[in-house]
Amino acid sequence: MNTITKKEAISAACGFHSAQTESELEFLFTRAIEFRQETIYFIIVDRFLDGDSNNNPGPNPELYDPDRHYWGKYWGGDLQGIVNKLEYLKNLGITAIWISPLFEQVESLQFNNAPMHGYWTKDFKRINSRFLAKGEDNTLDGCQAFRRLIDKAHELGIKIILDIVCNHSSPDVNGEKGKLYDDGVLIADYYNDVNNWYYHNPEITDWENEDQLLHYEMMGLATFNESNIHYRNYIKSAIKQWLDQGIDGLRIDTVKHMPLWFWQEFLGDLKTHRPDLFAFGEWGFSNPRDGKSPQFANESGMSILDFGLSGAIRECLGKNAFGGFHLIQEVFNLDYQYNTATELITFFDNHDMCRFGSINPDGNALRLAVALIMTCRGIPCIYYGTEQYLHNDTNG
């Protein structure tokens, strides 16, 4: 039987001659443009691999737990650890790595928790020194560890997706809250907010109240005032610097806690700077039935994580819920709500929920869940360690 390539098929359908195909249609098949070809692997940097033990104590050893018993403290993972496993990930079939935020964090504990997750940012233009070699320059231009990661990944054909958060900086730790720096220079302070960089509202109590979602605080985190042009210019200039270093895509945290107009401006500016940029956001517990999250995906300039499908997979394959695969099909039946459902990021566990193996230790169920997201519409994302059946049942 004669076979034709995808390029040849599109060429014929578009009326191009075969001689034109390679040169004139090559752009259609480059990963830089078509992100739906990717298979993503999500890494929490501190938890993945300790590639350089010399940096483990960091600036404040109190934040590090060498015995790895305290879940809220640093355990030693770093950028060198990711570099060491790039060949492994390549052989696994991974083409893009989503890594937790790399920004410089506050160096203090709150309720015995450190910002090992990366969401208590101190300076968006510097790198968390705990992920680098001891004493290494943590500026974007001077950091060699970050450069090695980018270069090695790209050499292997692997993209790097950086996790960013635009909604907030840090909570109150040791009497300081929301102190923000611009490449080492203090520019904002929640407790001395003379230039109105932050909202000063109480905690969210009604998660259905849009005003609270947009303007109130989550867990005491200092919430940025996006109406402040100086804040907007700062956050855009910071992320552009990361893109200039070679970052290929963005995962954006807590997107439903900032207004749509902000994201349209933010993504519009970044995509003018980098036209091939792909971004997806975390609209927490999004569902095609809610109306709001599909609208956001359609109008914001970014895709979103498919929490609706994740929940259905966990119910069907994790909990053997009544309804079975019909629960999953019901989600697919609502794909018409999205302009591009094929760009949704599909997954079934992440850092905000217990692992699939903790709700169902059956390896067959996990393999079926993986097979589902690898073959259905959307861009599949595997949480680090899933391929090794990693889970822990401590306190959920």
Image (spheres, rainbow, N blue to C red):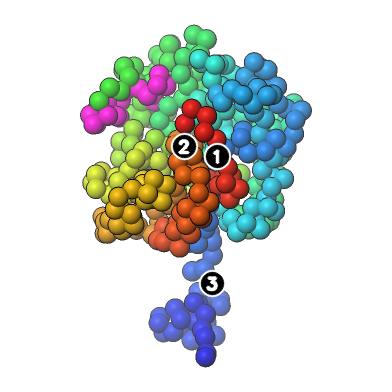
Q: Which residues are magenta?
A: 207-224
Residue at screen point 44% across, 78% down: 10
The amino acid at mark 2 is Cys
Residue nearer the viewer, 119 or 110: 110
The amino acid at mark 1 is His
Q: What percent of the width, then of the height, locates residue 339? A: 30, 57
Residue with the mark numbered 1? 391
Question: Among all residues in the image, which is located at the extreme right?
Answer: 54
Please say whether residue 223 is visible from this viewpoint.
yes
Mark 3 nearby-residue class (10 Å; few <14, some 14–19, many ≥20): few
Label 3, label 2: how far apart the Cα atoms are? 42 Å
Image check: 204 left or right of 10? Answer: left
Label 1, label 3: how far apart the Cα atoms are? 42 Å
Q: Looking at the image, is 23 positioned above or below residue 273?
A: below
The amino acid at mark 3 is Glu
At mark 2, the secondary structure is: loop
Residue with the mark numbered 2? 354
Q: Looking at the image, is 331 positioned above or below residue 101?
A: below
Residue with the mark numbered 3? 26
Residue 212: in magenta span: yes
| Tag 1 near tag 2, CB within 8 Å | yes
Residue at screen point 43% across, 11% down: 192
Per the picture, the main secondary structure of the magenta-coloured stretch is loop
Check residue 262 in the rendering and tell me which mark sits there, or answer none. none
Residue nearer the viewer, 11 or 173: 173
Please say whether residue 331 is visible from this viewpoint.
no
Residue at screen point 73% across, 37% down: 51
Which of marks 2 and 1 precedes in the sequence? Answer: 2
At mark 3, the secondary structure is: helix
Image check: 41 left or right of 211? Answer: right
Image check: 306 left or right of 59? Answer: left
